[in-house]
Amino acid sequence: MITHTGDNGERSPRNQLNTATNKLLLPMDNYEYYIASIEEILKENQKGMTVSELALDLHMSRNTVGKYLELMYLSGVVDVRNVGKAKLYFLAPRVPVTRVLSYLSDAVIQTDDRYRIVNINLSALDLLGSDEDDLIGRNLLDLLGIQGLTSEMRARITNPDRDVAFTDEIRVHTDVRPRHLWMTVADMVMYDGVLGHTFILEDITDWKEAEQKRRISDFLFSTLAEETWEQVCIFSPDYTILYANPRFAASDGRGDELVGSNILEPFDKQASQIIRDSVETVIETSASHRQVFPVMIDQQDPRWLDQRLYPVPDQSGKVEQILGITRDITGLQEGGSASALLSVLLSSMAEGVLTVTLQGTILSWNQGAETITGYPAEELLGGSALTIIPPELNGELNVIADAVRGKTVRDIRYTIRAKGGRKKKVILSSATVPDHTGEISMVVLIWREP
């Protein structure tokens, strides 16, 4: 027989049971005492005990001990394993659920079968706006009714034919503001075997408000995007189109297959590289970027596009999507007959003239540049100008980066790399071209032979 003596030398209640020869010291319906006694014994016998061993130690019948063990098993206090034909009961290696409840952000309320509160966590106290002493024993449905629980929902909760557990959304009113709650109601069996209920209330007010704002934003965005005459699209960092307004779809020509396709498909090599450079800048800086560049369509005269890219970050701030707004400014950029005169002038110049993006991608390449370097325009358009004007051959002087920062050069001696890898000395100057807002949109490089 197992005996136990407390730290003060007095015999524990369980040992008093062991020494009682004629009758039990407490009535049989004092379940809390017997459950505590079983727990105490199993703490000393962690490998487990059978019903018969526990009954012998407690001087109780096997049926009575079995009833309490079944209750403790259903409540998660003990576990059981089979050893041959015998069943060994031992304390379950779990944290008691009631100890965890106060650490949950969801409101958790346990009631008896008449919906009177018997246990409540800290989040629920905050939700109901009262102290625990004021809430224990009160009817939860009455409290929620005061805060706006509908009679229909109350009838559903109390319906004896409903499911053992169900979830639904409810709306209640607090002193601060109305709250939207995601409510789970589940029927539970208490330690004493009596039916009870558990309510789990998740406050989804912020989520509901955020969803409403998102719906409004989506509606406003789609409405404005469909009304504007500019080409609007949203695409992912891997260039997959997620949204395109009607004007963008009309300019692209891919129709219903547009969403889900690659935004770079209709562009030539040069324009594709320019867009890639802009996207990389937007992702790296998490800031908007503007670019003006030409696009060749069906071997016709180039059309000039003014493209603005904006980052769309996720909750962590990482660029998740990119908003693109494009305007065809061909007439404005070419300036009517001035473009024809400029084209004739550039083609007749002996100097090499090229225009590049702020990242150094070559936009244009005249006949003079071809004569001096030996590179035809089709080999270089859309490529990097740094392959022709390498900083490493000029004391790390990067004339493009300097021009972007506002520091242009005039008639400096510079070494370029001609076709075949030949080094060639030239006299080089740089200039910048602003857009209509005054921001630098491209860099012009001019060189001549000494």
Image: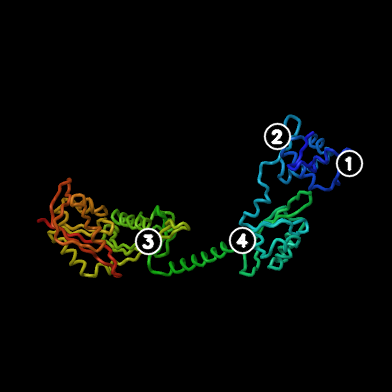
Query: Between marks 2 and 3, how big is the CA–CA gap?
Result: 64 Å
- For residue 133, above or below residue 37: below
Mark 4 residue type: Asp
**Closer to us: mark 2 or mark 1?**
1
- For residue 423, above or below residue 144: above
Which of the 4 quarters of the picture holds residue 287? Answer: bottom left
Query: Between marks 3 and 1, how big is the CA–CA gap?
Result: 84 Å
Mark 2 residue type: Lys
Residue marked by disc 4: 203
Measuring from the top left, give residue 62's x and y in whole percent. Answer: 83, 37
Which of the 4 quarters of the picture holds residue 140? Answer: bottom right
Counting other residues with Cα less than 10 Å from the Cα at mark 2, is it few (<14), some (14-19), or many (20 or more)? few
Measuring from the top left, give residue 386's x and y in whole percent. Answer: 23, 52
Pointers 3 and 4 in contact (C-beta within 8 Å): no
Query: Between marks 4 and 1, how big is the CA–CA gap?
Result: 53 Å
Residue marked by disc 3: 287
Mark before the other along the chain sequence, 3 or 4: 4
Res 100 seen here: yes
Residue marked by disc 1: 23
Which residue is drawn at the image coordinates 18% and 66% (left, top)?
342
Which residue is drawn at the image coordinates 64% and 70% (left, top)?
175
Counting other residues with Cα less than 10 Å from the Cα at mark 3, is it few (<14), some (14-19), or many (20 or more)? few
Viewport quadrant of the N terminus: top right
Measuring from the top left, give residue 177's x and y in whole percent. Answer: 61, 69
**Closer to us: mark 2 or mark 3?**
2
Residue marked by disc 2: 47
